[in-house]
Amino acid sequence: MEKNNLGIPSKSFSYLIICGGIIVIFILVGIFPMYRYTSNQAGEIKKIKDQIEDLKVNGPTYLKLQKEMASKDLHVLPNPKKTTISREEAAKFQNVFRTIAGESGLKAISLTPDSSTMAGSSKFLLNNAVLKGEFVNFRKMLIGLAAIPYLDRIEEISISQRSDSMEFRIKIWLALGS
């Protein structure tokens, strides 16, 4: 038996190297990929746990919002079928306009029909309106006006800031019929 410098027989030394190589290959092929796989899985598990925690925290708020959306009417803008109004009934528009302005929180200062469209055989009647109030309420008033079926169009809107409130000037066209 030959012995090397360490005092180990050379045949035993070669077995030791072969067994050590098998252990290193086993570690490289089996254990290291399994370690990487488990660390990736741990990252995925942490991400899912964070999502679950977010759902626990935000879940009641989400359910509350869903419940509110189901119970409330969505803000659907009115879109009535367009009709016309007779010249005699067009005088009633002032009362309708003042009611809509009051319900929306605005003060109707004036509503005057344009004299050039009142006379003759025009198919439209122009009304010049002046309102005072807050801008938020003006939106409500426009939505209320959109519900009037004989309102043809709003031609011009002028908004100016006054010392006490905002002033709104509107040109409203009504569709006239027979």
Image (tube, grey):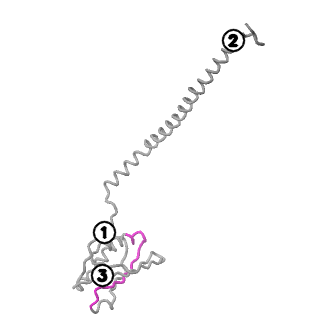
Question: Can you tell which mark lies on residue 78?
Answer: 1
Left or right side of 109 for 161: right
Residue at x 28%, y 77% (from the top left corner) = 96
Give the CA distance from mark 3 to mark 2.
Answer: 111 Å
Q: Which residue is mark 2?
A: 11
Question: Can you tell which mark lies on residue 174?
Answer: 3
Mark nearest the camera among 2 and 1 is 2
User: Which of the pair 43/23 is nearer the observer?
Assistant: 23
Callout 1 environment at 10 Å: few (<14), some (14 to 19), or many (20+)?
few
Q: Which element carries disc 2, helix, strand or loop?
A: helix
Range drawn in magenta: 121-139
Q: Amino acid at mark 2?
A: Lys
Instruction: Find residue 129 and report its image quarter.
Output: bottom left
Against 122, is 132 above or below? above
Residue at x 61%, y 24% (from the top left corner) = 25
**CB under 8 Å between callouts 2 and 1?**
no
**CB under 8 Å between callouts 3 and 1?**
no
Left or right side of 77 for 16: right
The quadrant of the rendering that contains the C terminus is: bottom left
